[in-house]
Amino acid sequence: MKIDKITPYIAAGIVGAGVTFGLCWYFMDLSRKDIIEAGQEFSVIKECENFLDENTETKKDGNARIAAINAYLQSIGDKYTLYYKDEENDVKFQTDYINSSGTAEASGFQVDISEDGNILLTEVKKGFSADNQGLKKDDIITHIDGVSISEHGYENYANKILGKDGTKVNLTINRNGEIFDIEFTRSHHYINDCEYERIGNVQYIRIRYIDRFMQGQLDQALRDADDTNKIIFDMRNCPGGETYTVVTIAAQLSGSAKVDKYFNNGYTENCFEEYDARCAGKEIVLLVNENTASAAEIFTAVMKQNLDVTIVGTNTFGKGIFQEFKELSDGAQLRYTAGYFTVGDWECWQGVGIAPDIEVEMDSALIGTEDDVQLAKALEILE
């Protein structure tokens, strides 16, 4: 009798064990298939590489492999997913350093590394010094004062294009195969992350980048605005900056800021700060454009939700996601999209952007010029 009572449990146990074994085998088999399929795919890549080595000229400097890794990562991630080797970090640092310099800002150019390791001019603003001296977008600078950039290393020598205001440097240019020299006179001025000036009875405040260093500059700009009730915050071309800093700044201006960060792994982080609103009762216009992104969009959202703000310009960039870094076994870094954020009760605007209350189209190269129609519209609203 006891055996009869136990038998069903034994049978159930055997069946359960069989199901568990079957599932384990199934998933192990799937894993094994994934490994086999991945191996086959990479073997095809190697086959193609070997064929190209034998039949054509191929790149052997390691950049092609890094590009291949990033192409694969971005095919399974997004455009912000990148693999950085030490050399890659140096190149990025040098590029960011040059592009944020007073020389590049005042002269009106932006750079990146070209395929052959020289300086590629990715932007030359119309009417600025670089344009007036004959430089053009897509020009490649191969030598600075006769020294080869690619031979000395872009990451080591590209910054020689920078220098004191009024100094001259000889640039060798490759323009679609035509080689010639230009004696380039550098323009330069110090760029603050936050600049301000009084235009009539309106305090104009331009925020170029958001970090802890600009907080003191912004505080001075606001103290200077104590005697006026009208303020323009110019966030055009502001790529963002530090999330926690913008929460503090926006809260101090508007009274409170609530930013929730939703990580892809399920973790949620809530950022909330509250202050006496420094801009309460002020008439405010906020200028934005297609290059207003990330933390600058957080600033825009907080100000719009908590104050009577009029947004003028064009639809913002639409970056509502954030990135983090992972150290890899080979010493490189993986930058990946870790999640998204929301502000107040607004939905995330990733890929959508924030629409202005009054749309005014304008080329961003005209910011600060006599043809700045977006600024003119802001001043008209505050008349």
Image (spheres, grey):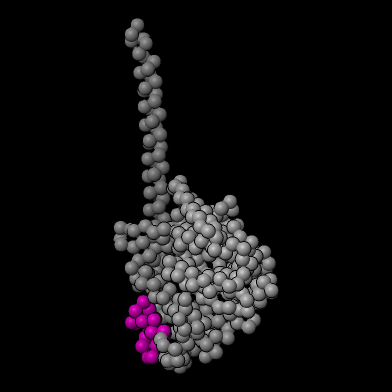
Q: Residue at x 40, y 86 (%)?
A: 163
Return the x and y of residue 321 as percentages of the image width and height. Answer: 50, 57
- Is the stretch drawn in magenta largely helix, strand or loop? helix
Range shown magenta? 143-162
Q: Residue at x 41, y 88 (%)?
A: 164
Whether residue 108 is visible, yes or no, is: yes
Q: Residue at x 49, y 59 (%)?
A: 247
Return the x and y of residue 15 as percentages of the image width and height. Answer: 39, 24
Magenta run includes residue 150? yes
Magenta run includes residue 377? no
Q: Quadrant of the C terminus?
A: bottom right
Q: Quadrant of the N terminus?
A: top left
Is residue 19 found left or right of 305 in the rendered image? left
Asked where in the image residue 325 lies, by quadrant, the reply is bottom left
Between residues 253 and 319, which one lies in front from this camera angle?
253
Q: Residue at x 58, y 86 (%)?
A: 127
Name the residue furthest front. Answer: 227
Please, is residue 186 above or below residue 291 in the view? below
